[in-house]
Amino acid sequence: MNRKLIFEKSKKGRKGYALPECDVPIQPIEDLIPKEYMKESYPELPEVSEGEMVRHFTALSRLNYGVDTGFYPLGSCTMKYNPKINEDVSRLDGFTAVHPNLPDSAVQGCLELLSKMDIFLSEITGMDRVSLLPAAGAHGELTGLMMMKAYHRNHGEGQRYKIIVPDSAHGTNPASAAMVGYEVVEVKTDSRGNVDVSELQKLMSEEIAGMMLTNPSTLGLFEENICEITDTIHSSGGLVYYDGANLNAIMGITRPGDMGFDIVHLNLHKTFSTPHGGGGPGSGPVGVKRDLVPFLPVPLIENKGGQYICDYDRPLSIGRVKSYFGNFLVIIKAYAYILTMGAEGLRQASETAVLNANYLMHKLKKNYEISYDRTCMHEFVLSGKQQKDKGIAVLDIAKRMIDYGIHPPTVYFPLIVKEAMMFEPTETESLETIDGAAEILMRIAAEAEETPELLKEAPHHTPVARLDEVRAVRKPVLKWHAKNK
Amino acid sequence: MSRYIPNTERERKKMLIEIGCDSEDTLFKNIPEGIRLDRDLNLPGPFTEMELYHYMKKIAEKNITAEKYICFLGAGAYDHYIPSSVNHILGRSEFYTSYTPYQPEISQGTLQAIFEYQTMICELTGMDVANASVYDGATAVAEAANMSCKITRKEEVIVMRTVNPQYRKTLKTYARFKNYEVFEADYQEGTTNLSDLEGLISNKTAAIIVQNPNFFGSLEEIERMTEIKAKYNALLIICVDPISLGLFKSPEKLGADIVVGEGQALGNPLSFGGPYIGFFAAKDKYLRQMPGRIVGQTVDKNGNIGFVLTMQTREQHIRREKASSNICSNQALNALAATAYLTLMGKQGLREVAYQSLQKAHYGYNKLIGTNCFSPGFTKPFFKEFTVRSEIPIDRLNHNLLREGIIGGYDLETDYPELKGFWLVAVTEKRTKGEIDKLAEKVAKTI
């Protein structure tokens, strides 16, 4: 049965709102606005009662799967539990009803929080200053690379136009590099899953602006030669950028700043427990070492003897990267998370995340191939190659997991692993949940042998079966048309 | 152990034994000794829930809010009313604790909501296609400029000086690194000086960017700009207040190729500037150059209608350095707020919000001019925001008003040095006659 769109539920004359009567003397509209500016017809927005609106979206919510619904081991996304108190404190009037154009003196609470968050995140990453402006991870990358470019230009090295990115990197890395006009040079991964350092050394030249690196990598492995890598880049005048997607493995254990990274972005919507909202809002703060502080975007919040101010007078700054001060309510949630966890709690979170990942990997070894068989960090990558040889794609395995009530891992990524499945269980899952998931995956491996059609037809119990994505592209229907009725 | 981490010491030991590890330290053996942190992080906490709540409440209380004060401040962020039910929808954790809908079979809720959102944005703007959102109005303008350069293969854009100064600054940052040039067309009497625009535009111009109503609240003469840009094969990007589209001609009718804007006013609180939502819509022919997620309708094998992320060959996870943008996470939950808000307000409600804002703003303007404390600022037709000129410094005026429980307007001199004493006042449907009268009375008293 097809679900109706909200537009199909609309009935002329129904209302979901009530505004007070306009209590100022009404002037004829034509006296205020020349006729040529006015609409001739009004947008076809739905007309429904409040109850119908609520029921419609509640019904939609029930078609979704979230962290609150069940296990969500989506690799590199850190789908940990989103604490409820953080939602509550972010919704205090004292935060939600603050106008961003108020003078600094009227928003001391907001600025204090941002300033302290800068200090917390600097401490966690080992950097000197952190800007909270970027709205998401990719936006943090963009901001970070702009600073890299500005730094080189300022040092008379504008000729550096290439950036090294490992073949295992997130797609946002090369895409962000292109947005600042950098050319991407790929470096290969060696047989242990590390960046191939000898190949890296061969790539170095005066054209190299720097390198972007995720550590642990998207293979879930710690770069064992990280110090050699950062030394190699530095010794030829480049800067090293840390993609913080995988910070959940190392909080309180090691820090990007101590590894030699110059620029770091974090994903508060991953590591720091803020919910992902079905695709945002996130928050992607970017931290730098001292030499790069002058290039941070404006404004930067400063504490002048207990008074917090927004500093715009920063001549070397790359400028503004968005409106106002960042995704403030998201930052509040992450701030609350850090306070709740404390130093010991954050360390335990990382230790547990790593333990959970290794435990799950260990359980799955028997049934699925492991590309790089060594201790993993907070996530690991399996290959469905054995199954593929028998005609079962990783996509089939993923869809079958849905039948058993768990969210599939990240699939077909990283690109360097054939039939990749990237699992990240996070620290907030219990032993039973992980054991249960392992059992399901073992059962699916058996089904792949015995009843492969069960996998190929999966999922069986969802509101819709697998959807025709080719048709969606060939005959794009990107909005509802009244004539479809 | 933290209450967010379920496994007990005993269970952890069991797990370690099972994987053949003698201690948790062994798990980190791949990290070189020299870079391991040999101390605890220097952080406060851990706080219990009660401690945290009281602490956060204390910080929140240090702020001045539009909840306790009467707000006449806008300049890009507006105090419109948000019906309670919008927040109840956002509070459904099936929505807010889910990731980007990569697995459509268990994400139909998010996907259908985005499809409905795209439809509503197209309805409002008159455009053919809309994406699932970008970060905010500022980055929407910058992404639209990037996109125009790609479409036209030209390397200059012209932005009107009446566009929100923060948007222009963000645009310039993006442009500087992407290597295209940004020129600014000046204004006269509060709207774009068309002869200045004509002097700047050339065959090298990829796009002209105009905000309507503009940063001063005034309505621009866009149809004239459309004629001008057509001669040079440049695109027209209109940045628009979505509430105004309850009353005013749609950007499509005015000749827009790309329409963007800040969607905060649609059900999203002021929130000290974020998270907000940038909406982004364009004509069909530019679909493949659009940034961001797009949801499309399709069918499953049983013929059931369903929704998927589509046109993904534009995006970073497929195209990597050749993607139309690097955007990945966007502002999905804020788009949901906009969808729920527009559903509630509907065809009549959006018009009424716009109509009341317009009437109240004009009442406010006349009232303030009537105090004899101000002379008129710009005198072009305006929507919900207007300018008046004050003899006394704006910061002093605003400071005095705060003491009376009123958040005054925006000091335009902040961004336009030539506009000393120009006060930009916003009046939404939330303001009552009594509140507007109080503003006029307190202004008279303080001046």
Image: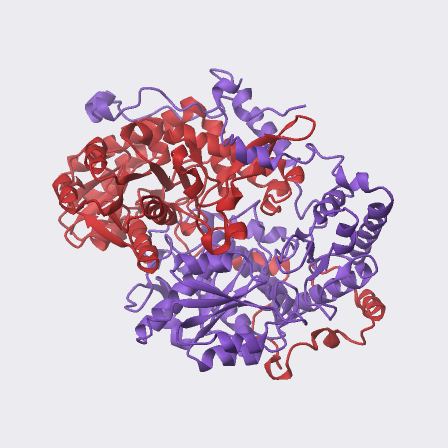
Chain colours: A purple, B red
Depth check, front residue: B276 or B173? B173
The N terminus of chain A sits in image quarter? top right
Along the line of sight, the residue nearer the viewer: A294 or B438: A294
Q: Give above or below for A30 relative to A184.
A: above
Q: Quadrant of residue A58?
A: top right
Residue extending farthest to the top is A12
Left of A25 or right of it: where is B346? Answer: right
* Residue name at image x 35 percent, y 47 percent: B150
Q: Quadrant of residue A177?
A: bottom left
Percent from the top left, x then y, of residue A309?
34, 64
Q: Name, please, the residue furthest toward the bottom.
A: B34
Q: Is residue B313 above or below residue A107?
A: above
Residue B331: tell me if it is visible.
no
Q: Position of residue B372 (x, y in %)?
A: 13, 39
Where in the figure is residue B284, as x and y percent of width and height? 41, 33
Residue at x-position 81% and y-position 70%:
B16
**Any part of residue A469 in sight:** yes
- Whether B120 is drawn above or below B45: the answer is above
Nearer to us in this view, A34 or B300: B300
- In the figure, is residue A41 to the left or right of B229? right
